[in-house]
Image (spheres, helix red, strand yellow):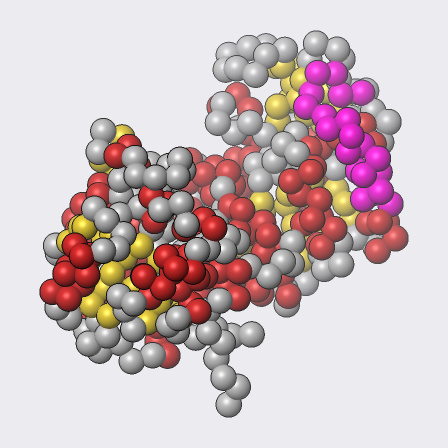
Amino acid sequence: MEKLTIRDVDLKGKRVIMRVDFNVPIKDGVVTDDTRIVEALPTIKYVLEQGAKVILLTHLGRPKGGPDPKYTVKPAAERLAQLLGKEVKFVPALYGEEVEKAVAELKEGEVLMLENTRFDPGEEKNDLELAKKWASLADIHVNDAFGTAHRAHSSNVGIAQYIPSVAGFLMEKEIKFLSKATHNPDKPYVVVLGGAKVSDKIGVITNLLNKADKIIIGGAMMFTFWRALGKQTGNSLVEEDKIDLAKQLLEQAKEKGVELVIPTDAVCAQKMEAGVEKKVFTCEEGIPEGWAGYDIGPASIELIKSKLADAKTIVWNGPLGVFEIEDFANGTKAVAELIASLTDKGVTTVVGGGDSAAAVSQFGLEKKFSHVSTGGGASLEFLEGKELPGIASIADKKKQ
């Protein structure tokens, strides 16, 4: 179902309350990575250019049920002002007299930012009284925070019960790429899944067994699959209680004619740190005691290359090794570069948020994919086929 966006509504003179995702790292009162703020700029600029009065809401970090100066969003407001080249008014409150006065004084084309939404414990409970207070400040709600789309909170879902909610450009782009990849991908459709735990990815694997042509496994969860194949994994991370499940997934893939690709070798060490002795062990020979796998090996990289060669749609979620340590970053980097090179050949390439997005930016490749998602948990649940409350609450386009 197509969603209404900011292009579909008249914004002139309207008070717009916009949920953005400015959950950015801050050190000594300064934003250290402004990616999320930069990504929200097109939406904010468009709404301002249309002559709206903008009130911004965002969460930051996980304050424990009340105001905590450590989690103030004021530095984000200051960074936004620099990027916009105009004043961003900041009110260190979420509702009440000071907020109402600031909103009443807002002129067309001006921006006001309220304090961290999570300073009110009602936010994460989707407290409708809180939502009503925010809704009373505005005529229209714009939801541009895909990163929280899998959560039903007052600022993204609750408000939509009282005033119309439309998608911003960032949300629209996320829905477009992830929907296409999930519901209507160009075939062959190949999914690369990394990360440490099978348990985090069960839902995704199960859902994709009905859609994908190939599923490539990487990251530490490959060792749970090695064990399912009866191989030795030494001291590698294995979910002992998920070995049977891995066996079932291998069986289901066979039944459904989906190729489940398991790496054939691993880069191993006796400690997970830089500069230690490394050895490559194959799945066949197994990993000896005292050694653990921290990255996919050279043969696995070649295997994955061959499996991606004919893909028309690629979705990648989760790193293939411990990419934060350079000694174990090779697999993730090689696969990231390979997928990036296929984008140039017309393949649709989507990177799920979280660690994969962090890896892509570490390698300086973020501009080389069709789409890099801004939401880790949200993109994962989207790929699981779940309905996300923060998308369901946005108004649908009426069929002509």
Asked if residue 173 is positioned above or below residue 32 in the image, the reply reads below
Closer to us: 131 or 78: 131
Is residue 213 toward the left or the right of residue 128 in the image? right
Q: Quadrant of the N terminus?
A: bottom right
Instruction: From the top left corner, tell me how far across and down residue 331 is, in percent.
Output: 58, 32
Which one is in front, 222 or 214? 222
Residue 225, quarter of picture:
top right
Picture residue at 81% right of the left edge, 44% below the top: 249
Q: Report the magenta residues as a range.
A: 232-251
- Whether residue 32 is visible to the viewer of this picture, yes or no, is no
Write the residue at 79% across / 38% down.
Answer: 246
Identify the residue at horizontal 66%, vertical 29% (top origin).
220
Q: How many marks do you count on the picture?
A: 0
Residue 248 in the image, given as x and y percentages of width and height: 84, 42
Give coordinates of residue 304: x percent, y percent.
67, 41
Asked whether residue 245 is drawn in magenta, I would say yes
Residue 206 visible, this angle = yes
Which of the 4 image quarters holds residue 139? Answer: bottom left
SS assignment for the magenta stretch, majority: helix
| Image-based side of 19 in relation to 200, left or right | left
**276 relative to 381, above or below:** above
- Compared to residue 292, the image places residue 181 above or below, namely below
Q: Residue at x 15, y 66 (%)?
A: 104
**Quarter of image, res 384:** bottom right
Q: Measured along the vertical axis of the image, is residue 308 above or below residue 392?
A: above
Classify residue 184 as left or right of residue 113. right
Q: Whole-percent x and y of residue 85? A: 14, 54
From the viewer's perspective, tell me whether residue 163 is left or right of residue 112: right
